[in-house]
Image (spheres, grey):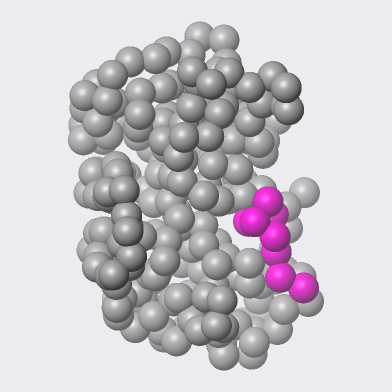
Amino acid sequence: MSFSKEEIAQRIAKEIKDGYYVNLGIGIPTLVANYIPKGINVVLQSENGLLGMGPFPFEGEEDADLINAGKQTITTLPGSSIFDSAMSFGMIRAQKVDLTILGAMEVSENGDIANWKIPGKMVKGMGGAMDLVASAKNIIVAMQHVNKAGESKLLPKCTLPLTGVNCIKKIVTELAVLDILPGGGFKLLERAPGVSVEFIRQSTLGRLVVEGEIPEMRVD
């Protein structure tokens, strides 16, 4: 049984430490805002110019003036701050962000990421991803393990235009939690409930390292 997008976000939320400044990318990463563990004081940053982002609003309580980098309506928390993009990217480039959580279309076994363009398809632009991957202290990717055709998105080498090189530390998919090894390769840390190691191996085109018993992913 693979994880849902919400469960991927819940699992990644467990990686957040007290006092962190965290940037949430477009897609699955935005869901992490709904699952910050109790007792954890964290400041969520959106590169369009916001510190102190809260959970998504309930239906009927949306404020069209409050949006994240993906143009989704959001909430703010007490003490939040709104500013221009220049200051926001100044924070990013000065490495003030402790953790960045991004979506991806492909990740290579040596930690390269492709997440901004598919050749031949219309794109709005690269957004802030290239600044984030060049500056972040720690990057976790939230993504689907395979595409709609069932083909692996964890590869020996990315086939799409790169966003960043050798920058990803950890990946959480609907099937597994994996680390990028310093010498290259995906180290399997956890597997989704009911998903076998062999199935994860078949779904991973890049080099997969499996050591000992692999525990199941937990979100509680």
Q: Is residue 188 visible?
A: no
> In the image, is residue 16 part of the stretch drawn in magenta?
no
x, y (%) of residue 94? 21, 31
The answer to whether residue 17 is above or below residue 162 is: above
The answer to whether residue 33 is above or below residue 139 is: above
Q: Tell whether 97 sits left or right of 210.
A: left
Residue that appears at 67% across and 39% down:
35
Q: Residue furthest top?
A: 79
The answer to whether residue 26 is above or below residue 38 is: below
x, y (%) of residue 83? 33, 15
- Between 77 and 13, the one nearer to me in the picture: 77
Q: Tell whether 169 sits left or right of 120.
A: right
Residue that appears at 57% across and 10% down:
78
Residue that appears at 42% across and 66% down:
105
x, y (%) of residue 48? 35, 29
Q: Tell whether 88 sits left or right of 152.
A: left
The magenta stretch spans which residues?
Answer: 1-8
Question: Which corner quadrant holds the N terminus?
Answer: bottom right
x, y (%) of residue 23? 42, 37
Number of marks in picture: 0
Q: Is residue 95 visible?
A: yes
Quadrant in the rendering for residue 120: bottom left
Quadrant in the rendering for residue 37: top right
